[in-house]
Image: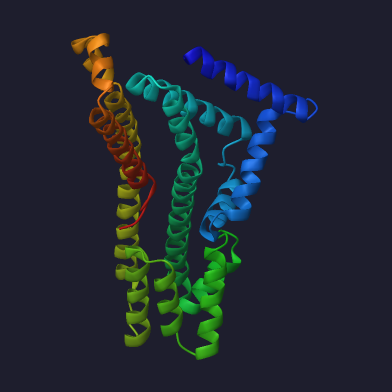
Amino acid sequence: MIELIILIAIGVFIVLYRNYNGDNVGKYITDQVGNSLDRYAPYSFRVVREKTKQLGMEFTPRQYMTQILAFGVAAGIISYLYFYSIITSIVYIIAAIAFIPYLAYLRCKRVYSEYIFEQIQVYTTNTIMEFATTQSFVKSIEDVANSGVLENPVLGDVQHMVDLAYQNGSIDESLEYMNNQYDYYIVRNMHELFLQITKEGARDSGESLDNMQNDIDSLVEAVYRDRMERQVFHKKFLGFGFALYLMVCLIQYILGSETYLQILSLWYMRVLLHAVLLVNTYFLVKGEKYYNENVGAE
């Protein structure tokens, strides 16, 4: 049966190769997938994917093809070990490959959220430094916006803060706007401090600014430490998750192949095995979602 799957895959490759006049079939497939994502994917996916490309962290066509092959082969082997059915294996192969766009979205969200957090770190740190010199919040964020250290979308939002401040003659709406755009502890605390200094007219704000800068440094250190710990946990989590898939091999070893095949003839046992596969897959997807979300959030 495994040989038949390989022959079918080779046949599909040959047909694609002949139909596209020797073009790079892998590039053609990934280009078509990319075009479909650009056309049908949610707006949020297109935004984070575009930023991931700009950061040079988007997967190459070769990497996507490797991912497709790895998912297809793994799904085919695992499902065949469970059910010894080529039709069932094909269904699981298609389902596994269909998950790749979602996993790409999660990865792009992680890259994007890490990028946003780093930009927020730059925004808060530089604003505090500028304020220590100018003693004016509006002048501080204006200098930060013009310094070239920020990039969009944070740069555009900071420039909008400046426009709101000049338009309203106060910083209240500017701070509320930025707090709503970036719901980070360091952003809200810094804005609250600047609002307090502006409203109360504090004469000596140096100590308060130093304390705020120390809080930001401590938080950033904690976030980066958490990021490294997540990476280590992620590798162990994936290893454990895939090991659970192969528990069927242990079951077959204990029961024997003939007994296992007799069990497969019972419809409710097949349903149970499908449930085991789906629950384990759900467990892995939830873990992957957790790993890629809320990076840098407090």
Question: Taking 232 as reference, is 176 above or below it?
Answer: below
Residue 25 percent coordinates (x, y):
69, 29
Question: Which residue is at the front of the view, 115 or 88?
Answer: 88
In the image, 12 versus 43, the foreground residue is 12
- Position of residue 127 relative to residue 55, above or below, is below
Q: Is residue 136 visible?
A: no
Q: Residue at the spot x=34%, y=58% of the render?
A: 216
> Residue 166 appears in which quarter of the rendering?
bottom right
Name of the residue lying farthest toward the left: 254
- Residue 222 is situated, as x and y percent measured from the top left of the image, at 30, 48
| For residue 137, side relative to residue 30 (left or right) | left
Q: Is residue 184 visible?
A: yes
In the rendered picture of this protein, how many numbered marks are placed on residues?
0
Residue 58 position (above or below residue 134): above
| 139 sits to left or right of 187 | right
Q: How is the image coloured?
A: rainbow
Question: Residue at 45% of width from left, 87% of height from top?
Answer: 170
Q: Position of residue 282 (x, y in %)?
A: 32, 41
Q: Position of residue 45 (x, y in %)?
A: 52, 54
- Res 74 quadrant in image: top left
Q: Quadrant of the C terminus?
A: bottom left
| Residue at left offset 57%, top offset 42% | 58
Instruction: Pick the residue in front: 126 or 105.
Output: 105
| 170 in relation to 21, above or below | below
**Residue shown at 24% from the left, 28% from the top:** 269
In this rendering, position of residue 168 left or right of residue 240: right
Q: Residue furthest right?
A: 21
